Amino acid sequence: MIPKTMKACLLTAYNKLEIAEVPTPEPGPDEVLCRIRAVAICGTDPEIIKGNHAKKNWPPVFPFILGHEWAGEVISAGERVTEYKAGDRVAGEAHRGCGTCANCMTGHYTLCLNYGKSETGHRHYGFMVSGANCEYNVYSPKALHKIPDNLSFAHASLLDTAGVALHGIDMIGVSSGGTAAIWGPGPIGLCALQMIKGMGAARVIVVGRRHRLQVAGELGADFLVDYEKEDPVKRVLEITGGRGVDEIQECSGGANVLGQCVAALRKGGKINLIGFYDDPKVIFPPLTNLVMNEITVTGSRANPNVSDRALNMFAAGIVKGDKLISHVFPLEQYEKALDIFSNRKDGAIKVVIEP
Ligand SMILES: [Zn+2]
Ligand SMILES: [Zn+2]
């Protein structure tokens, strides 16, 4: 029996959260009703809560249910759904493109040209439409992936994080036998580290600080560069014999890192940006350097076309997603969980809610 109401964590205004009993959603003919078993807090969640993404229209209404990094079970499927049935263990993607625009047609559905127009079928779960900080939600089958048997729901809820890292890597590749660097050993950077090692880079340098830098060492980084103690560019050049690294995944979003990254790349090197650079103090690198050294700079948005591979990397132990889970809380303690996550208390890396 599916209960008529469910527990949900509502954002009722900026900086105002409330655990409430709300109607359980019902799936349309093309949708699947899922029981949310685990939902990880994403770095964007506290920013949305504070109102820092109001310009992006996240969320479009109050009250709103956030949460987009989730795993759970299929409870029931609409009459036109053929791929999923009750009992399937699944993890979600936040983006579901319209499916018919030029970008969706070429697989770039996180860049859907009908973004936010739900009448076209577009969904951005937990951003533009209801998310997973609750007991049940309805999803398009296109946003679901079956999870391997050896993964817990909590582990699988890190799919979004790992997928974002993998899409960033897809943008610029990995030089097998080469040297890569990661700026920012947060959850995405720590996934990227393990993937880049798994994909054959001979050496991975991680630039960061404190606890998270130490975790990067535990997860296989070959060189740890603490930017509070040494100049990261000087150190990277030292490690690479003055040549610079082949690729950089910039996962920090730091205001002064873009110039550092360009200076730490080899000629012809590539950098992919995963952070948000909204800080008015962001310093952009001299563009002539990009031209003279044929530096490729890409940005990568979210996690299109990577989820099954990312889940396989979890299942195979190439990416130890579970090592990133520092805390688990029930839904009722969402605010406490948010505080621990946002303020990086008690060694917090990924904080997972089990509704
Ligand atoms: Zn996320
Ligand atoms: Zn589209």
Image: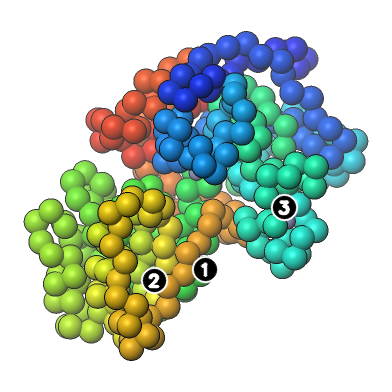
Which residue sits at x=24%, y=68%? 260
**Contact (Cβ within 8 Å) of mark 2 with mark 3:** no
Q: Is residue 99 above or below residue 126?
A: below
Q: Secondary structure at mark 3?
A: loop
Instruction: Out of 2 and 96, give the one closest to the viewer.
Output: 96
Disc 2 secondary structure class: strand
Side (left or right) of 317 relative to 344: right
Q: How many angstroms separate mark 1 from mark 3 (CA)?
A: 24 Å
Q: Residue at x 80, y 58 (%)?
A: 100
- The residue labelled by disc 1 is 170
Give the labeled residue for mark 3: 114
Nearest the eye: 280 or 236: 280
Between disc 1 and disc 2, the foreground one is 2
What amino acid does circle 2 point to?
Ile
Tell me where residue 117 appears, x and y as whole percent: 73, 45
Q: Is the CB of mark 1 within 8 Å of ligand 1?
A: no
Which label number is shown at residue 271?
A: 2
Mark 2 neighbour density, 10 Å: few (under 14) some (14–19) many (20 or more) = many
Residue at 68% across, 29% down: 137
